[in-house]
Amino acid sequence: MNWLKPFKRALSATVISATCVGVSFTASVVQAEELGYPEKEELRFGFIKLTDMAPIAIAYEKGYFEDEGLYVTIEAQANWKVLLDGVIDGRLDGAHMLAGQPIAATMGFGTEAHIITPFSMDLNGNGITVSNDIWEQMKPNIPKMDDGRPVHPIKADALKPVVEKYKSDGKPFNMGMVFPVSTHNYELRYWLAAGGIHPGYYAPHKGDTSGQIDADALLSVTPPPQMPATLEAGTIYGYCVGEPWNQQAVFKGIGVPVVTDYEIWKDNPEKVFGITAEFAKKYPNTTVRLTRALIRAAKWLDENNNSNRPEAVKILSQSNYVGADYDVIANSMTGTFEYEKGDKREVPDFNVFFRYNATYPYYSDAIWYLTQMRRWGQISDDKSDEWYKELAAKVYRPDIYKAAAESLVDEGLIKAEEFPDFATEDGFRDPQTHFIDGIVYDGTKPNEYINKFAIGLKSGDKI
Amino acid sequence: MTATSIVSKLSDNQVLSPKAKDMVNNITRMAVIPLLGILGFLLLWSAAAQNIDTSLGKFPGPAAVWEQFGSLYEEHTTERGKEAAFYERQEKRNAARMEKDPDYVPKIRAYTGKETFLDQIATSLVTVMSGFLVAAAMAIPLGIAVGLSKTLNSAINPIVQIFKPVSPLAWLPLVTMVVSALYVSPDPMVSKSFLNSMITVTLCCLWPMVINTSVGVASIDSDLVNVSRVLRLPAMTHVRKIVLPASIPMIFTGMRLSLGVAWMVLIAAEMLAQNPGLGKFVWDEFQNGSSNSLARIMAAVLVIGFIGFLLDRGMLQLQRYVSWDKSSADR
């Protein structure tokens, strides 16, 4: 088994305690007094047409890349697989990635390659949309407010009777997500499972990577921009995807977003910027410099209480970036979210790029994704808490982030208090309580966390 | 009553001399009828467009597409402006660095902005022509050899027959993987994506040219071959003086066929592999799903068609110019 390799390697090496892990990976980055010129100046970055690619577009358009002496070409990719392969085979130097992609690639689930991330791109930004037909069937199960609008957040409990009806009629209840290791897959699963709908297990050791074992709702992969079209065609009844593709469904009148990921898990980490470990090692200055440019772009996006967002939306609506209509993108980027047509609500933190230390690569974020991979069987065997921490430290590289942030502070471009306190930061967020099912997540105890779920594999379980 | 019959009635009028009558007929056939055809198509198109509601709004009519041509051109000029600014900034930055670090050898980097519609057209044209020329360079000599030798023909024929009907798109994944495995260089001369599209085009251009060339060579008039025998021409002279001229019409027929196929394949390949060019333009617009997307795609469709037409005409003119058999060009 491929994915066992790093585990065995890690075991055979001396047992490293969790605290040294953070330090042990700092060695490879040169923390020079003054940052040198980039070793590689012409770079090619990939992205998928989603609004959360904004930091890359802004770093380009606002000249932050050029300020670092980097000449970057930005290229839209067909789907997440093509994008990941591009980074692995060197066609792309770096890319906008799903948080689960570097983790899974490093672990060897799917294509194996050592990908790292020095920069987390944003928080939140996804939604779950169902077709009009399903929405009509869900609606009677949802409590109403005084003005007749449904109470949010809507739980999957409202969807459960619908799924059961389909099941008893012998019809498969199909839903779409964007990639097996995508944040969307785990969020959709989390939401469904919290409402008692089983999203199915993976069993990679038996060659089953469809993720539909024991499933009530069958999830399959569709590239984000094609989601609305697939929903319209009736191939799937609902999907979980990033913006603007939920708002697009409202505009086209083909579906209704029922819940945002902000409501499933408040301020959840979403995309990361992925590069290969080899790239970071070969071009340390370039790596720090591109991280600097991205941090500045993220800051610009959240500056002065989102006042730059309209300009950002204008840039994103250009055909070479996201390319959807201004109004569609603006809906979610400027702090509102439209559920049912006309039901527009304030969600000021729907897209967070810089606030709440959004750009800092927390180990605990990586570990949350690992716990979900274990919960749904993508990791088929039990792992120790240490294993989770080691893998997280292999992929998430706060040391590079720290070098970039500190040099920005030295140059006076960003104030030190806008970053986490690097002297005390250990890479683990405090236990997080804002989940839709009320279960508390503590990144330092992954195994204990997995055992808390009613649906999902627990310690000792194997498919 | 159709336009043709009106015009033919007019020309039947005895007042016109026979010569004038011919001229009227010609003008009618060459200009008036096609124009009417186009007009009819535009009317049908806009009428149909009015009635098709897609999830991206109404299907674009001729007016919407025309507007997009304007905005595409505008985007092109804005992008050129940005490009000039990009180079200016770069020069300043290089100069600043030279002051700090005298050993630095300044390098001017190519513009990193987006490719406009016009750039995409140019990319597609360059790709198709290079793929086509590479194919011609291989297929014509091979075709001649196969046409001259019955043994070689029987050896190669099964391979050609098997590969000919393969959709070139089936080759694409293989080509992509092979190129990325074999073409490794830190500072590549041409990009991998260009090679991918070009090789795919080459692969599908090869077969029609091989077949037509070999048939052309094999069916040379036996008198000509006999003349060559009597004169005891050396092999190369035989090919140059007898075989090539005699089979030019067939070779060109093969080339025209190939170029047509190549153009169609290229667009599909670009779309599938996300290689730069018109196909990628179409796919990107489809993915964008903005309210202008359909009109832009329609604009691209018209341009693709028009370029395909021009390529075919170009080959035809070339054939007329080169070939001795003027009638073959009209087929």
Image (tube, rainbow, N blue to C red):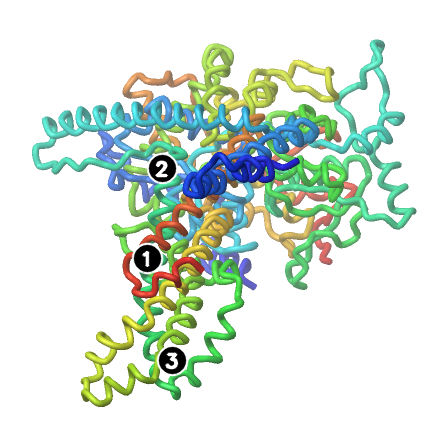
x 72%, y 44%: residue: A451
Residue designated by label 3: B218
Q: Locate the N terminus of chain A and report the quarter of the image it occupies.
A: bottom right
Q: Where residue B272 sits in the image (x, y, percent)?
A: 51, 50
Q: Secondary structure at mark 2?
A: helix
Q: Secondary structure at mark 1?
A: helix
Can residue A92 be seen by looking at this rendering? yes
CA gap, disc 1 to disc 2? 31 Å
The nearer-to-camera label among 1 and 2 is 1
The nearer-to-camera label among 2 and 3 is 3
Tag 3: amino acid: Ala
Can residue B200 be seen by looking at this rendering? no
Tag 2: amino acid: Asp
Q: Residues within 10 Å of mark 3 (few under 14, many from 20)?
A: many
Q: Is residue A278 above or below residue B205?
A: above
Residue designated by label 1: B320
Tag 1: amino acid: Arg
Q: Residues within 10 Å of mark 2 (few under 14, many from 20)?
A: some
Mark 2 vs 3: CB contact within 8 A:
no
Chain ID for label 2? Answer: B
